[in-house]
Amino acid sequence: MTLLEAQELGCWRGERLVFNCVSFAIKPGEALLLTGANGAGKSSLLRVVAGLLRAEAGKLLWNGEDALADLPAHGARLRYLGHQDALKPSFSVAENLALSAGLHGGDVMAALDALGVLPLAELPARVLSAGQRRRVALARLLLGTSRLWLLDEPSVGLDVDSVARLAPLFAAHRAAGGMVIAATHLPLPLPDSRELRL
């Protein structure tokens, strides 16, 4: 059964048509990879699906209903990871995740452990490398429950071993009926995913 469906979505940024007539459907357990050249609209499409950017045309449906009619409800069923890692530099790694856990619930230390950054829990975020910051940001996905993960270049700054750590996390999310939509230029450990090239 299709849970999320985009019908003929179109998006303008300023005076530029970024994409038009984009349609897809995704079922529980599925993954969709957004590919294409820089500037093709991958990030904008993710922001439209997240409800952060208004579509100029088309519809976004959740279980057959207007997904964006109730933005707080839509926001509660997804996690969005953009280009920015959104970490407060003076807060420790654990404190940064505790903010998300306060909103969504979840075990901060287990999430950090899953991404291999538990030993960094008490360090201020400002001293982390780019890859460490990205892994901390990815750990937020594991807090609370959400059906849909929207990931914009999730592997940026990650080494090969860190990307491999994502495989069991993606697999467990999908096995529980979760869905993943990821914009990427590089291969991700998402077997049996479909591709939408913009």
Image: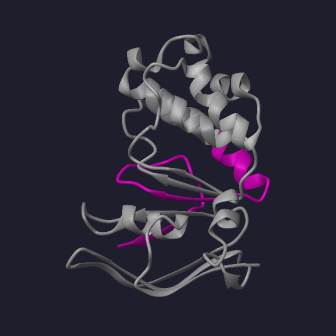
**Along the line of sight, the residue nearer the viewer: 197 or 191:** 197
Q: Please name whichever residue, 154 or 57, is drawn nearer the observer in this view of the structure.
A: 57
Q: Is residue 88 left or right of residue 25?
A: left
Name the residue at 59% across, 11% down. 119
Residue drawn 63% across and 25% down?
A: 112
Q: Residue at x 73, y 43 (%)?
A: 104
Residue 83 seen from this side: yes
Q: Can you give x and y, in whole percent of width and height, for residue 44 in the image?
A: 38, 66
Q: Is residue 116 visible?
A: no
- The N terminus sits in image quarter: bottom right
* Highlighted range, magenta: 169-198
Instruction: Tell me if residue 61 comes above or below residue 53 in the rendering.
Output: below
Q: Is residue 175 magenta?
A: yes
Residue 99 rendering spot, x and y as whole percentages: 63, 33
Furthest-left residue in this view: 15
Is 104 positioned to the left or the right of 167 in the image?
right
**In the rendered structure, does residue 193 fall within the stretch colored magenta?**
yes
Residue that appears at 25% across and 64% down: 39
Quadrant of the rendered image containing residue 67? bottom right
Q: How is the image coloured?
A: one colour
128 vs 81: above or below: above
Question: In which quadrant will I find the C terminus?
Answer: bottom left
Q: Residue furthest right?
A: 176
Q: Position of residue 30 (x, y in %)?
A: 65, 64
The quarter of the picture where residue 140 lies is top right
Of residues 72 and 165, the one nearer the viewer is: 72
Q: In the image, is residue 67 above or below residue 173? A: below
Which image quadrant is residue 139 in? top right
Q: Position of residue 158 (x, y in %)?
A: 41, 32
Give the side of residue 154 with respect to residue 4, left or right: left
